[in-house]
Amino acid sequence: MYPPPYAPQDTRSLATQVSSVMKRVYIKMTLGLLVTAFISMWASQSYDYMMFIAQNRWAVWGLLLVELGIVFGVSAGINKLSSPVASLLFYVFAVVNGLMLAPIFIIYTEASIAKTFFITAGTFGAMSVYGFFTNRDLSRMGSLLFMALIGLIIASVVNMFMHSDTMSWIISFAGVLIFVGLTAWDTQQIKRLAQMSPEASNGRLATLGALTLYLDFINLFLYLLRFFGASRD
């Protein structure tokens, strides 16, 4: 998936490379979140768009397929893509996800969305800092979290047919715990890859890292919104 491991010999050089990659990861991720937020707010205020989405379920599935295609395309083809192309795909994903998230501005109040966003930012920031600085190997935790994520996806699909409120709350609680843990694990993985990868791959690694943490943030936000979001009804 990545270029052959390459470890700089000089400790200062290694620290500089890691710092450079992580800075680019967080900047790109933040820009992606801003793009998503602006597109989502704009789309939610478009009567024509919201009516189109409400009346055409195939459009929602189409947007979802585009998102999945970009995620798998960037992840699987990161070594074949140039850094500008990978970045472009990331921002396209941010735009499409903004279109997908537009309905939350119809369902929840702006104040509760903003409150949930700041709660998410604080939680995400704390766990990402922990993942970066901890000396504990989180690999085993990452494997467990990945299996839990698969279970969460299966439970979510099943509940689409069951329509159980109790199951929905359990899924939301589990989702928060899973993505809190994944934030720390993914941060540690990105840091390790930055230590092992050649400098030439920094741009592509930063894009993949930004996409990974972006997904952690968005999913954590959506699950927390289930608890802190105030309905307009």
Image: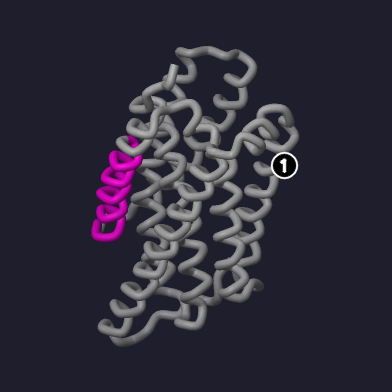
Instruction: Say which quadrant the C terminus sits in.
Output: top left
**CA neighbours of label 1 inside 10 A, class few (<14), some (14 to 19), many (20+):** few
* Above-or-below relation of 10 to 173: below
Magenta span:
116-134
Q: Quadrant of residue 225?
A: top left
List the single residue furthest toward the bottom. 10
* Above-or-below relation of 10 to 64: below
| Residue drawn at (66%, 59%) of the image | 73
Q: Position of residue 60 (x, y in %)?
A: 67, 36
Q: Quadrant of residue 218?
A: top left
- Using the image as rendered, state which of residue 233 and residue 220 is in the foreground: 233
Residue type at the position of mark 1: Gly
- Magenta region includes residue 127: yes
- Magenta region includes residue 125: yes
| Residue drawn at (31%, 46%) of the image | 121
| Residue drawn at (32%, 55%) of the image | 137
In this rendering, position of residue 90 left or right of residue 29: right
Q: Quadrant of residue 28?
A: bottom left
* Above-or-below relation of 182 to 32: above
- Which residue position is annotated with label 1? 62
Q: Position of residue 95 (x, y in %)?
A: 57, 52
Instruction: Say which quadrant the N terminus sits in.
Output: bottom right
Q: Position of residue 153 (x, y in %)?
A: 56, 32
